[in-house]
Image: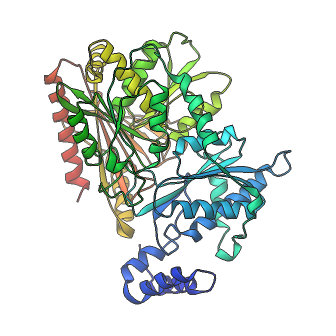
Amino acid sequence: MKIDIESIKEKAKIWLSDDFDKDTQQQVKYLLEHDEKELIDAFYKNLEFGTGGLRGIMGAGTNRMNIYTVGMATQGLANYLQKSFQGKDKDIKVAIAYDSRNNSRLFAETTANIMSANGIKVFLFDDIRPTPELSFAIRYLGCQSGIVITASHNPKEYNGYKVYWEDGGQIVPPHDKNIIDEVKKIHSVSQINFKSNPSLIQVIGKEVDKAYLEAIKPLSVLPEVPRSLKIVYTPIHGTGIKLMPYALSLYGFNDVIIEPSQSIPDGNFSTVASPNPENAEALALAVELMKKENADLLLATDPDADRVAAGILHKGEVFLLNGNQIATLLTYYILKHRTDLNPTDFIVKTIVTTDLLCDISESFCVRCVEVLTGFKYIAEVIRLNEGKQRFICGGEESYGFLTGDYARDKDAISTGALLAEAAAWAKSNGKTLKNVLEDIYTEYSLYKEHLINIVKKGVEGAAEISAIMDDLRTNGLKVPESQLVKIFDYKQQIIKNLQKEEQLPLQGFPVSNVLQFVYDDGTKVSVRPSGTEPKIKFYISVKNKFSGEQSLKQVDDKIKMINNLILQKYGV
């Protein structure tokens, strides 16, 4: 991508006008005079309002998260809400929540002010709250939309703006594209109505907490199981501290030790390099505390508490569960003990989540539905089947899970409580969740997954990611000792059957820049550029019969071989 530095400078100089606050003007002036590289990254494009909202590094500039880019997004959303709901015998209402990140409160208040300035009723949480509670609050309060200010598990430099619709799910077609069109019409900060109407802003808090906790209590599958379980919990400086201890208590778990240094909300995430519970490093303090306390279970939530990680003490060692294993255990636990299952029940998983979920659900005569990556697609399936078929649970490999339809997004709070209950059930049978996982592998098959994140930052990185996808689309991905039999191209909407040398239409999925390579031995590799970070993701899945440690070594060796192959070719 060719950069015209002079046009970027002219674009930046607009931010020196009185339409912008003094601090922003000073930041831009510094970039113009002292940091050309950062100036380019801050202004070479506009921060894109994608199909879920905004996410980016905080700072001054059109390609940064700040009150002006947030303001333009909010004005566009407000305009779309007025077009969609005005004159339909109801006032337009939105709920707004925010996490513990730096500037989250500022961005939430900015959003509330602009919404109210446009005549829209606002329910603004009084303090940080988990994202799933925002999803719940939308329907509970009868809102037409919701916004949560969060960058999920991204590093501290990031923040984000996630938009929800009246069903409590993140926006999907056609609303996502329609909102994007409205946001693109906001070309200048002068088009933003910042003049708040305080009479339209209502602060909410404990009353919604209480209703949310009442909604998740009936999700307990085996309330009679003894709760003799010691739990270590860390919110990793995030919003989980607001609800997780209460949810665990509600489920009867009172022997809960909270990691003290990470219990304090902190936008700098001062005890970790990155607040991502998928990374073992982020759990190090909690693991240390778990060993010290000889606890049975470790739970950890990301900053907005929609993802939960877990660890168990097995034979004196801490065994960390990944997202696929958590989804596997909970799907099995729920279906095994639900006595009211019927043929119209279904579960949902994303295409990059372990296929073991489908094997399990089908063994209980429960339909398994697959969707694109992103929990919003799981929420969409719930909405489309509401009143016709019953959603039991849904999961994704990135540590997201939901059971019940009280909310329409992944929920670390209810998932953590259910994990504790499943661990208590296992303990009452003389087992740990690792033993249960091995039982599942024995009954079905051993599935092992691995994720490769290849980071490609900046303008050049975006071009490199595009080139990788082009190469894979043209040449495929050869894996030694496995024969490639099918290629699913979700962008071109085709399935290539290499064995039959035929090409079929790929139906039932929206267009997305995703490739999936399927091999004759059950191996699967899925590839997609991240929608929220400057990286391309490779999802590896290997399948084998389970026969103890030898079969584990075989799948590990296979994964290592594929991992090295991909990194050698695309990781430089």
| Up-down relation of residue 408 to residue 223 (above or below) | below
Identify the residue at horizontal 56%, vertical 82% (top origin). 15
Q: Is residue 446 visible?
A: yes
Q: In the displayed structure, would residue 362 be above or below residue 61?
A: above
Where residue 314 sits in the image (x, y, percent)? 21, 26
> Which residue sits at x=34%, y=20%?
228
Q: Quadrant of residue 211?
A: top right
Q: State the image coordinates of residue 399 (x, y, percent, origin top left).
A: 39, 38
Q: Depth check: 69 or 263 in front?
A: 263
The residue sitting at 41% across, 26% down in the picture is 253
Image-based side of 422 in relation to 201, left or right? left
Q: From the image, which quarter does the N terminus lie in?
A: bottom left
Q: Residue furthest bottom?
A: 33
Confirm whether residue 73 shows in the render: no
Q: Is residue 159 above or below residue 222?
A: below
Nearer-the-camera pick, 462 or 136: 136
Residue closer to the observer: 261 or 494: 261
Q: Position of residue 570 (x, y in %)?
A: 26, 55
Residue sitting at the far top: 339
Q: Foreground residue, 556 or 189?
A: 189
Q: Residue at image x 50%, y 26%? A: 393
Quadrant in the picture for residue 226: top left
